[in-house]
Amino acid sequence: MATQDELKRQAAQKAVEYVNENEYLGIGTGSTVYFFIEALAQSKKQIKGAVSTSALTSETLKKFGIPEVTLNEVNGLPLYIDGADEINHLLQMIKGGGGALLNEKIVASAAEKFICIADESKYTSRLGHVSLPVEVTPNARSLVARRLLKLGGEPELRLGFTSDHGNQILDVANLNFDEPIKMEDAINKIPGVVENGLFTHHPADLLVLGCSDGIKVLTARV
Ligand code: 5RP
């Protein structure tokens, strides 16, 4: 049976087919994304440049000789490719396991198309089996944590972690995601919250899922 990493790699390799040469490409963060960058380099497809979402992804791009550009340098982004911690049938996601949720949401929102790459363990009928990462300014950490408790969550500070923007992350368990759009908005309204890892306003357009019985390419099922 294929391991989780093998399924991630298969999804990542398949996603390279969707990349057009001579275009800019937004690239997320995480182990599935690492496999994607590796596969893109091996494919020899030449892109104009990649908009990275983290220092880690920038390092990987450099390692594989893929040129990087900033979001400010590009006028629109045809495609964004990224992993997820959880994704449902509407292709709404929980992201931020790697702590890059702020840049990921910015770059995803700039792209015309978002392709999520994941292994089958990430696909769920109901979001919320994993904690929701919430990026907060350090001075507001306790205040935000108390507000998140009032929303029904159980926040826990991600120890020893500082985001690329100098912020901290609260991983919040037990939130109710019956209405995920409302929850995304409610959390982002708390002063001190920089961003949260719910991607409901910008769900993926396509999911390339590595499964033990083959690769599946899924669109949202309403
Ligand atoms: C990083 C993310 C990642 O996409 C998510 O954590 C999935 O990671 P992996 O591909 O390693 O399973 O949101 O902030």
Image (cartoon, grey):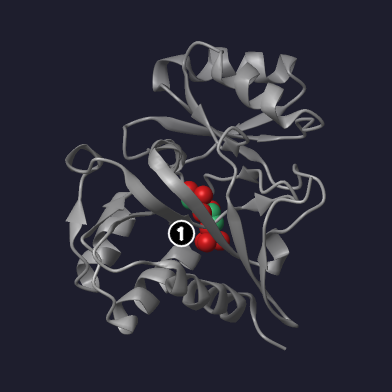
**What residue is at 43 percent from the left and 45 percent from the top?**
112
Residue drawn at (47%, 15%), measured in percent from left and top?
192
Task: Read off the residue under disc 1.
Answer: 30
Q: Is residue 118 visible?
A: yes
Q: Is residue 28 visible?
A: no
Q: Residue at x 30, y 51 (%)?
A: 52
Is residue 200 depicted above or below 96 in this figure?
above
Count of numbered badges drawn on the protein: 1
Name which quarter of the figure residue 61 lies in: bottom left
Q: Assess mark 1: CB under 8 A from ligand 1? A: yes
Is residue 65 found left or right of 44 in the rendered image?
Answer: left
Say whether residue 19 is left or right of residue 219: left
Seen in the picture, residue 3 relative to 60 is either above or below; the reply is: below
Q: Nearer the viewer, residue 146 or 219?
A: 219
Residue with the most extreme bottom position: 1
Amino acid at dot 1? Gly
Instruction: Please state the horizontal and vertical placement of residue 177, each as a whole percent of the image.
Output: 77, 33
Q: Quadrant of the C terminus?
A: top right
Q: How far from the left and from the top, in percent, is residue 86? A: 67, 51
